[in-house]
Structures are given as structure tokens and as C-alpha cells.
Image (cartoon, rainbow, N blue to C red):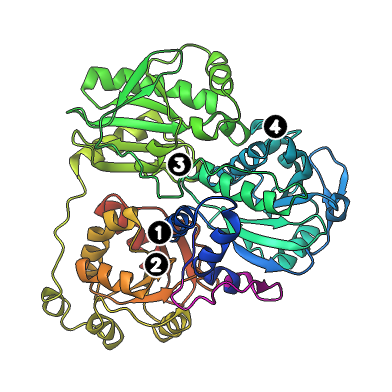
Amino acid sequence: MSSSSEQAGGATPRSWGRPLAVVLTALLGAAIVVIIALAVGPSSQTANTQAYQLTHNPEIDPGTPLHGAAPAFTLTDQFGRAVSLGSYRGKVVVLAFNDAKCTTVCPLTTEAMVQAKALLGRAGAGVALLGVNANPEATAVRWVHAYSQVHGMLHQWQFLTGSLPALKRVWRAYHIEAQVVGGQVDHTPAVYVIDSRGHLAEIYQTQMAYASVTQQAQILAREAAKLLPSHPSVPAKLSYGEIQGIGPATPLALPRAGGGSVRVGADGSARLYVFFASWLSETMDIRSELDSLDAYESIAAAHHLPSLTAVDEGSVEPSAQALPQLLASLRTPLSYPVAIDESGRVADGYQVQDQPWFVLASRTGTILWYWDASTQGWPSTPALIDHVNAGLAHPPHVKVPTLRQVPLVLAGSPAPLAAIHRQASKLLGPVSALLARIRSLKGYPIVINAWASWCTACQAEYPLLAKASVVYGRQVAFLGVDTTDYGASYARAYLAGHPLSYPSYQSPSGDLDGLAPVFGLPVTIFIDRTGHVVTHIAGQYDSLSELDRDIQTYALGE
């Protein structure tokens, strides 16, 4: 995710000895100089436009300059061969840290890397693509081989792994956080560009946005081009402006697998969608799961439930043949249509944060329910029907209490919680102040919500948090964290229009100091009465019942 700070240190390249979090706080502050370096040829007006676009696009990272030698390492590639970073001396290296079993941001990262090299044409021969495994639990060679194979990268890069101690040494050297939280792997989604002498040149954090992959590829390509001896030209074919997603409220025709088109979006009837990609075969039996949805479609037709449409995320498929080959391998043709999202804008508009991802949309295009099948498991047909019926019966319309009502509703709260209510909708200090507040609240469960003014998913779930913080305000401490925002003025303006019964703290870099990784927004963190983080939930809450359930389970321990 992009990072920003009103106190960023300008354009001076950051010393390698600083922690990654410090480097990233200056990310957008360095954007102007990055663009000047990138914009070889265009007019100053074009450069100024690009600079403005980059500083206002939360879905791409313009990069932060680094200097100093890249830490050396030797690991094992997907073919079982020992590979050292030093063996690439003389080439520009694009080095990414990826989870070998990832179904979220890593496929977007690697696709951006492949596209970046392709944009360089023949000069791309001077660029090496390198990956280091960031999964503490899948360190075997077979996992980096499987990832490379399903993503069509078996011979396009070296994906390195090793023993856990060996990997941890590399992670520490490159300031990568990699851990298992709540059964899921979370890691810093960092990409480094290293010059032909083995010196660090730039660092990027890649995003959980499908439509911005090609934009990030162009940025990577232009950075690599600067470092190649021939300085090849990389035409700025793409704007760096934010690409808006196309949500379920917008009727749209998408290409249909096998020919023709599929209508998606609001059409006067509720619709169930499942987003997927062929490369899910690495981590699940996606063929059987797609087959199983025929049973839902049959029951839906008989009982007037929303019909099903599958959406293949074509923007990150390894080839045009990947989807046809997957569908041809199924036992029988599917009874529901398969649409192809070629741009990624539909996935972004439907707020897809993982693969596979279920979305239930109302007849007017409101998201009623979503389900992350990668982390929560593929729902059985009866469970899917129950979820759909519950989503239709309890649409996410919530009356939000006003700030004037908060003191009356929450009167009589324990003193530590009453102090929170007196700071309703205030923007307070940095993460250090948040951590001190958490320590002072020991004995009370805490719910922390990380948000940003630019985050549409945060805006969508805002009424649910506003309501829940009043319903549970006498028992649970609610706190917010404004993170990776454009600046404090934007955050204060957001809070003025989205009043809450609790204050928010500021984390310009997105670094929550070990509370939980923040690789996309919103993120909700649950802390028990002893002050220990129980779990964190990445992504938007779509119903008050889901938020209620998690508060009762993770905060109150009921």
C-alpha cells in the first residue's frame, strides 16, 4: 500500500541502515523527485501531472530511493539449485518477497514484475527477476516450484527458498516481517530494485488492487531502464491516475468464457458471484469446487434464489489459455456462466481481497455479503444457501447515532471507556500514543479499526462500526487508526463527515508496531482483556451481524 506523511523527509535517498517502516513513511514525500527521475523525455507539464497523479493514487507506489550495498545471500531456487545474489552482478535485479502459497497480493506483484520486464523489450535481457519465499510454513522447494508453475513463471524468474533460519536471516537483512497470524501468513509486500553493481536503488510496496498492476509494472520498468547501460525508452503509455473499480451497482457486459458476453451488475435482481483464477489449483482443488457450485445453481433456480455468475480474474492469469484449459478439465460443463475480468476493475469494484471470493449483491448493486473462501473455507451448498438467505434477510442498513447522542447513550460507562467517549471523532497522536492507550486499557477488550480517508471499503463499513461502538461502548474500548492517508487534514475532514464515538490515532506509514500487518484497508484488530492480540480481520464488514459475531467471539470471548 502507498504510504504518506505530511512530515516526509523530501527527496533525499534514505540510508539503508534505517528500518523499513521509517523508509516507507517518506514514500509519497519522495514522489516528486522519483517522477523527475522517471520522466525522461516528457514535458515538465507532463511530469507535474504524473507527480500529482502518483501522490493522489493510493493503489500504486512511486518508490523510495535507497543506497548502499544489497545484503548478500545464497538460497535454493525452484529447481533445487543454489543461487546467490552475487551471481547476478552485471544485471539489474528486481527482487520481491512473496508467499509461495499466496492468493492475495503476491500474484499481483509477480504479474507486475513480468510485465515490467516485457515493457523493456530486448533490453529486458539485462534484468533478472528474483523472488524470496516469505512463507514460514511452506519452505520446501516444491512450494516455490508449484507457485512458479501455476503462474507461468517457471523459466521467467528464480524463486528462492531455504531452511527457516536461512530465510529469517534474509528477511531480517531486508527488513521483511513474515509471520503466521490467525493461521494466515502475513508479510511485508516489498519489491527492491538493485543495480548492476549490487547496490540498492529503490524500494516499493505492491498493492491489493487488480487494475493498478500494469501501472506498477510501468513504474518498475522505468526504474530498471534508468539503471541499464543503454537507458532504453519506456513510453509512458499509462496515466498514473487512480483507476476506479466498477462495482455491482453498474450494469456491465464482460467477455464470456467460450464466447459471447455475460451481464454483471445491477439488473433488478440479486446476484451471487464467485471470483477465482486458474492458479488456485496450487492451494485447493478449484476444479471440484467450481463443479460443486452446479448444485447451488440448480437449487437457486428452483427456489428463486439469486443466480450465480463466476468471474475469472483474467488480469492476473498467466496466459490466455489458462482459463480454457481449466474449464476443459472439469468433469462436466458448468451450468452457470463464467465471465472474464480482463482489466481488474470489476474485482476492485466488488472489493475482492483474495481468491476465491464470494460476493452477494442486491438488485440495486449493494454488497450484502462476502466470503473469503481461501481463509474461511469453501462453503458447502447448504452453508452457501444459508449465507445467501441471511444476506437477503438482513441488508446492511444501519442507523448511525449522532455525536450529540453518544454521551446520553453511553452515560455511566467505566472511567477508561468514558474517557474514550469524550474524545469522540478526535484525531490524536502517533502509534506510540496508541500503544500507551492500549496498555492503559488492560482489563477491557479492545477493537481497533485501521482506515484511511481514501478507502471506499472503510467508508462502506463506517456505519457498522459507528453503531457497534455505541452498542458495546460500555464493555469494549473502540479505537481507530488513520493509516497511509494523504495527511492529517484529510483524516480530520473524513472524521467530520463520519463521526464516531471514539478517537483515532495516526500512522502515516501503516506500521502498527507488531499489532497486526496492514497490507490493505480496512483492518480490524481484536485485543482481549489481558492486552493480547487475538486476531485481525482484513477487509470490509458488510453486515452488523458479522461484526457483532466477531466482537462477541474475539473481544468479549463469548
Residue placed at 56% from the left, 60% from the top? Answer: 36
Residue placed at 27% from the left, 42% from the top? Answer: 367
Q: Nearer the viewer, mark 1 or mark 3?
A: 1
Q: Tag 3: residue type?
A: Ala
Pinpoint residue 375: horizontal percent, then vertical percent: 49, 46
Query: Sequence order check: which comes first, mark 1 or mark 4?
Result: 1
At mark 3, the secondary structure is loop
* Quadrant position of residue 81: top right
Residue range of the region highlighted in magenta in the rendering: 5-21
At mark 2, the secondary structure is loop
Query: Sequence order check: which comes first, mark 1 or mark 3?
Result: 1
Q: Residue 88 carries which label?
A: none
Q: Marks 2 and 3, how far apart in space?
A: 21 Å
Q: Which of marks 4 and 3 is in front?
A: 3
At mark 1, the secondary structure is loop
Q: Mark 1 points at which residue?
A: 56
Q: Which mark is residue 149?
A: 4
Residue placed at 28% from the left, 35% from the top? Answer: 388
Contact flag, marks 1 and 2 (Cβ < 8 Å) = yes
Q: Tag 4: residue type?
A: Gln
Examine the residues drawn in magenta and state their main secondary structure. loop
Q: Marks 1 and 2, how far apart in space?
A: 8 Å
Pinpoint residue 180: horizontal percent, then vertical percent: 60, 58
Q: Tag 2: residue type?
A: Tyr
Q: Mark 3 points at which residue?
A: 211
